[in-house]
Structures are given as C-alpha cells and as structure tokens.
Image: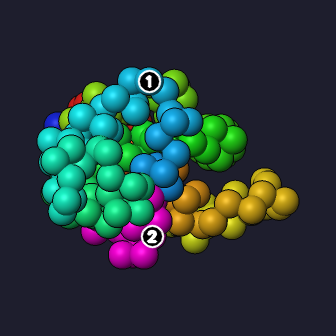
Amino acid sequence: MDNKEARFIPFAAVNEFLLTDYRQKLILAVLANLDQLSEERRGNINRLVKRLVQVPGFRNSALAPAPVKARAAVSTFERSSEFAANIMAGLAELKPALAKKAYDLLTSRGWEVLPLDADRTKLPGFLTRWPKSETFDILDEAYQKAYPDDGEHEYDINMMISWLWGRLPVELVEATPKDIDLNVTE
C-alpha cells in the first residue's frame, strides 16, 4: 500500500450522501430532543444555533420551536462542519442502542473503530477511503441479519456507521476495512 497522508473532508460533506427529507428529519430529531442530550452537546448545539441559524421573528434562534428551528438550520447543516458534527453526535447520543449495535457490527467485521464514547466532533472531518466490498447495501443486510427485530431505518444505520467509523465512501478502494485503519499514514 502506498504511504500517503490521510485525507479528511469536512463533516458537512455528509450532505452529499443525504436525501433532503432525511437531512430535515435528522436535524429535527436532534433539535426536538435537546433535553435528552448531554449538557455539553446541548450547549454546543444551542450556541451554534444562536450564532449561525437565522429564524425570522427570533433574536435568539435557539429559543424558536424545534420544527421552525430545524427548517432554518438546514442551510447551516449544509455549510457548517461544526454544526453538522454536533447534530451527528447528537443522533449517536439519542440512539445509544443503535450506536452500540452499529459499533458491534463494525468491530465484528474487523473494522477498527474509535471507542463509542470518543468525541468524534474533535476530529478534523471524515476520512475518505472506503472498501469497495463494504457497500451500505451489504452493511444494511449484515445489520438486519444480526438484529432482525431491530426497527431502525437504514438511513439512521448508515449515518451511524459513517459517524462511528469516521469515514464517508468517497474514495472506494480494493482493501479490507482492517487494511484501512485509523492511522493517519494510509
């Protein structure tokens, strides 16, 4: 394998992989459940909403009702990697069972993944290399086989997998996940 530096892309690049309806649903799910997030995550999101999101009729956008705030936050999610990262981290906090199942699925397949409790928002973004043999369809099928009674939507599963592994399938490579580890010299 060639020795080269790892390439990160901003967290907001996740938007290239999201359907418009899912992006809206994701943002709303997190903003509507801020009270269920850790104090730090809630504080980060409220600070970012106050600073970056414009809600007509509200001097402090963080005080707007969640559905109104979520609609106004879409463009912020699309352009602010810090905001996108905190929303994705919020999803992981809101769905700890899904996070654990996705983590277990990935590690059972030989993927090297940061610990579940690692603060991925501190990373510079997503890594870009992804094994061709591990498409979302294959991973969704493996997840359904491992957890047949789980009712999670495939979009949430895929988001969780990408968030936990810290990668997006930008550069598909002929390698196993174990060959694509978390080292910064890939």
Neighbour tally class for label 2: few under 14, some 14-19, many 20 plus, Cα within 10 Å: few
- Queried whether the magenta region covers residue 64, the answer comes back as no
In the drawing, does residue 174 fall left or right of residue 63? right
Quick one: which residue is furthest to the right in this view?
A: 149
Pick the residue in front: 96 or 48: 48
Does residue 21 show up? yes
Q: Mark 1 points at which residue?
A: 39
Which mark identifies residue 90? none
Q: Mark 2 points at which residue?
A: 22
In percent of width and height, residue 156 lies at 55, 59
Between discs 1 and 2, the one toward the N terminus: 2
Quick one: which residue is furthest to the bottom in this view?
A: 20
- Queried whether the magenta region covers residue 22, the answer comes back as yes
Pick the residue in front: 161 or 185: 161
Range shown magenta? 14-28
> Is disc 2 placed on a helix, strand or loop?
helix
**In this view, the mark in front (1 or 2):** 1
Q: What residue type is labelled 2?
A: Tyr
In percent of width and height, residue 32 lies at 48, 51
For the point 39% across and 67% down, the residue is: 24
Q: Is residue 140 above or below residue 127?
A: below
Pick the residue in front: 34 or 59: 59
